[in-house]
Image (tube, rainbow, N blue to C red):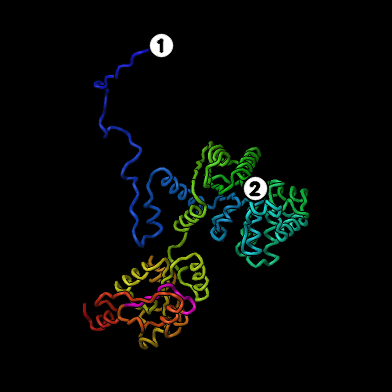
Amino acid sequence: MHKKFPPIDLSKVKTHALSERDSKVALSGFATPARSGASFGHFLTSLPDILIGADFRQFARQLTHAIQDKKTIAIGMGGHVIKCGLSPVLIDLMKRGYISAIAMNGATAIHDIEIAMHGQTSEDVAHGLQDGSFGMAQDTGDFINHTINTSSENGYGNALGKKIADTDLPHRNHSILANAHTLDIPATVHVAIGTDITHQQPGVSGEAIGRASYEDFRTFCSVVSTLEGGAYLNIGSAVILPELFLKALTVARNLGHTVDHFITANFDMIQHYRPRVNVVQRPTMQGGKGYAFTGHHELMIPLLAHALIHALEDPVPNHKIITRDQAIQIRNRLKDIGAKVVFTNGCFDLIHRGHVTYLQKASARGEALFLGLNTDESVSRLKGPNRPILSLEDRAGVLAALECIDYIIPFAEDTPKDLIAALLPDVLIKGGDYQTEEIVGREEVESHGGIVTTIPLIEGQSTTHIIEKIYGGNT
């Protein structure tokens, strides 16, 4: 039927004042601009109080309270988490007592073991598939299959963790399974037969896998039965662990355990159906709350870890004070990832504004500032028997509180030449009262392509002037 549609008359439309309308977004929730040298706490509070920015802060706060109340914090994880290099982060959280239990699929255990054995994992599947060599690494298959075949009492995860620790594998310190065994934290492995590369090798036993993995299912049910007031995080598993969690939760409730008020979160690059429904939505309908965070694991999980440590740990930054060997190890890692390292040194006795300004400017020249700090004996030899005014412990404690300093390395020699030669920083800096050719360590740094430079000092700012003023009785 043909109809006519004349333009509607809007002259009688009812309107109202903007101030009378309920709005979802307000200036109070806007982000705070970034600033140089800001603390992690500033970063966290600077996020918009809108959408995921608000959710992340709320989740981190609730998770913090659950940890403080000693509630169960369980994590389910897929293999990509290890392939992203996050084992050290999770192991650190385990050692801090933040994680009560870890569950993983078979692929995660494989990557964990290959890291422990050889310090590397993950192969080119497409290439290996062409000639049938994909998944045929004998070392991996023999280790896992033999361990499970000969372990008639332990669950899958505990058997592997114990074997890694007992075999003294070269990189066992980076193994989640081994660390869980050492820390007596349940680490369960949940295997779907036929999905893992070790199932296609000669030594596999379906019977042994089924027994060990079923034992871990029972353990995981026990973990889930204690989640009241706690938290469950699913990280990077789209199918196996979300299904596992749902079944374990129904077992716990069926047996009379109260598991109603707890939080869940799914961390993944894509929000799949099963994690969304089986982790975030259905389990929390009786009084809990579920969260979904979309993003790359290598960014999101360290962000969460930093938020927890910021909230839970003693703010005294003694971890910045390290030995020479630790400094070399850290320097080598920073070099591997292309981070620019800056080095400076000094006595820093009676720290004043000139020191702080100098260190802030030095820090801005790179991505990590290493500070060589003279020991008390070294200061006395350089400055005289009445120095230092403040002990090494006091000086290092004050310096460690500065955001601009990443690491402090005490040294007992008169000069830091040996320390500089060991670290070979990308940038070596001293104050403007030095000529570049006078700077200790210049030759070593420049010979390896580094830069040696100076920073102008603030006129009239020095420890000597402060001491003279004190002794002179001036006010």
Q: Secondary structure at mark 1?
A: loop
| Position above or below: 239 against 33 | above
Whether 111 is drawn above or below 438: the answer is above
Q: Is residue 348 left or right of residue 147?
A: left
How far apart marks 2 and 1 lie (CA) works out to 66 Å
Tell me if I can see residue 265 in this picture. no
Residue at 34%, 58% (x, y): give it: 35
Residue drawn at 38 percent across, 60 percent down: 39
Q: Which mark is residue 55?
A: none
Q: Is residue 455 visible?
A: yes
Q: Amino acid at mark 1?
A: Met
Q: Is residue 147 above or below residue 391?
A: above
The mark nearer the N terminus, 2 or 1, is: 1
* Residue drawn at point x = 47 percent, y = 55 percent: 303
Q: Which residue is mark 2?
A: 220
Percent position of residue 475, x then y: 21, 77
Q: Secondary structure at mark 2?
A: helix
Q: Position of residue 355 (x, y in %)?
A: 32, 73
Q: Which residue is mark 1?
A: 1
Outermost residue on the front side: it is 130
- Membership of 130 in magenta stretch: no
Q: In which quadrant of the rendered image does the N terminus lie?
A: top left
Q: Amino acid at mark 2?
A: Phe
Magenta-highlighted residues = 421-431
With 249 as the anchor, is 449 left or right in this view?
left
Q: Quadrant of residue 408?
A: bottom left
